[in-house]
Amino acid sequence: MKIAVMKETHQGEMRVPLIPPTADRLVKLGAEVVIESGLGLTCRHQDSDYEKVGARIETSRGEMLKTADIILRLRKPPIEEIEQMKKGCIHISYLDPFNEVELVNKMAAAGISAVSLEMLPRTTLAQKMDVLSSQANLGGYVSVILASEQLDKVLPMMTTPAGTIKPARVFIIGVGVAGLQAIATARRLGARVEAFDTRPVVEEQVKSLGAKFVKIDLGETGQTKDGYAKELTPEQVQKQKEGMAKACAQADIVITTAQVFGRPAPRIVDEGILKQMRPGSVIIDMAVESGGNVEGSEVDKIVEKHGVKIVGLGNLPGRVAETASQVYSANLGNFVDHFWDKEAKVFKLDREDEIISGSLITHGGEIVNEMYKKIMNK
Ligand code: NAD
């Protein structure tokens, strides 16, 4: 089977989907691995590094698209490339399917089997392939580094001859994978950390990282079977804002990571909260690319409102591209390996398997993903 790995076309993207050790792994599975020339350069992987492990370098993107049985990428494919792909080709990447209706329809019509890595079930077995987790973890780390750079204070407590410097206060909103890493990173830097999530089950995790859980009674919130938060009612959102106002007002840094699966991010830090915050404090809106948690945050910009710096920089994992590529590539390698028939040396698209049925969006000319169809009312 021919596995082609395409160079990223998204402007400013420094991450690469496959690094040489994973190419080596795929070659050893018996795949014919074709790498687009220059693929790894942004992370200092030369074409020759891929060749050394038995992959072939190709300069014609069109030829790769036309002949590949499997295409691996980081981001969604450019829409104009879909009709160049071979019918029946298995395409594995992020797909952003809820926002990319036209792309999904075109992939279905072209007979592509499109796997959306965002849709992998959050099960123990799928953890090794879970790109959302591997990237969100790094995003959480970067958010604290970015915030500390924007803040004009130090994070740790310091006892000095000139007096005691108090630790900075950090408030993390949303304690999924990114939020947990943000708590851990802020704690390592010595900050005093508080956190809140609508899923009460995370209270123990917050405490185990040495942070305080801010309790707000929102009534029934719960979570989905995959552990995702449910969308709050407008009344619950209002209660949440009131409950968080004090923690925000006391914070030097607020990091928001709140997401609701398949929906725009909830808007939970509003003008009223901003007005109560201290001038000079910093907010990192990690949800800025999916609608934003913070009123006034702008994608790829740092804006100031009521003296508060609101950082809306996108693609935070891309700021540690070498590490992000290492783990993304490992996730891809694990995905292919898991479904690889070692004797026949082919990838088996086992539609009975819950990992495939959860993440496969299009197949055989149709949209086949039940959850996608339900959320999109198809
Ligand atoms: P996510 O990115 O979907 O959301 C981030 C966080 O925002 C979540 O913790 C969510 O509860 C929270 N949130 C939503 N609305 C909020 C609001 N109004 N206010 C405050 N917080 C709000 O989450 P994620 O990091 O992708 O994790 C989702 C779930 O998957 C979690 O339960 C996580 O533990 C679980 N998970 C499981 C595995 C596994 O077992 N394989 C791997 C990774 C994650």
Image (spheres, rainbow, N blue to C red):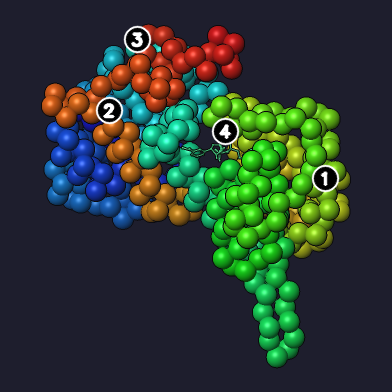
Q: How far apart are marks 3 and 4 (CA)?
A: 30 Å
For the residues carrying marks 3 and 4, which lies nearer the camera in this image?
A: 4
The disc, 3 or 4, on the residue closer to the chain's N-terminal end is 4
Give the quarter of the figure containing the N terminus.
Answer: top left
Ligand 1 lies in quarter: top right
Q: From the top left corner, tell me how far across and down residue 201 is, in percent.
A: 64, 41
Mark 1 surroundings within 10 Å by alpha-carbon count, few (fewer than 14), some (14 through 19), many (20 or more): some
The disc, 1 or 2, on the residue closer to the chain's N-terminal end is 1
Check disc 2 and give the amino acid type. Answer: Phe
The disc, 2 or 3, on the residue closer to the chain's N-terminal end is 2
Tell me if label 4 and label 2 are in contact, CB under 8 Å. no
Check disc 4 and give the amino acid type. Answer: Gly
Mark 4 surroundings within 10 Å by alpha-carbon count, few (fewer than 14), some (14 through 19), many (20 or more): some
Residue corresponding to mark 4: 227
Q: Give the numbered dot on residue 364.
A: 3
The disc, 4 or 1, on the residue closer to the chain's N-terminal end is 4
Residue corresponding to mark 2: 339
Residue at disc 4, secondary structure: loop
Q: How far apart are marks 4 and 1 (CA)?
A: 23 Å
Residue corresponding to mark 1: 243
Q: Residue 243: name its quadrant.
A: top right
Q: How far apart are marks 2 and 3 (CA)?
A: 19 Å
Q: Which one is in front, 200 or 366? A: 200
The CB of the residue at mark 4 lies under 8 Å from ligand 1: yes
Can residue 80 be seen? no
Q: Residue 10: name its quadrant.
A: top left
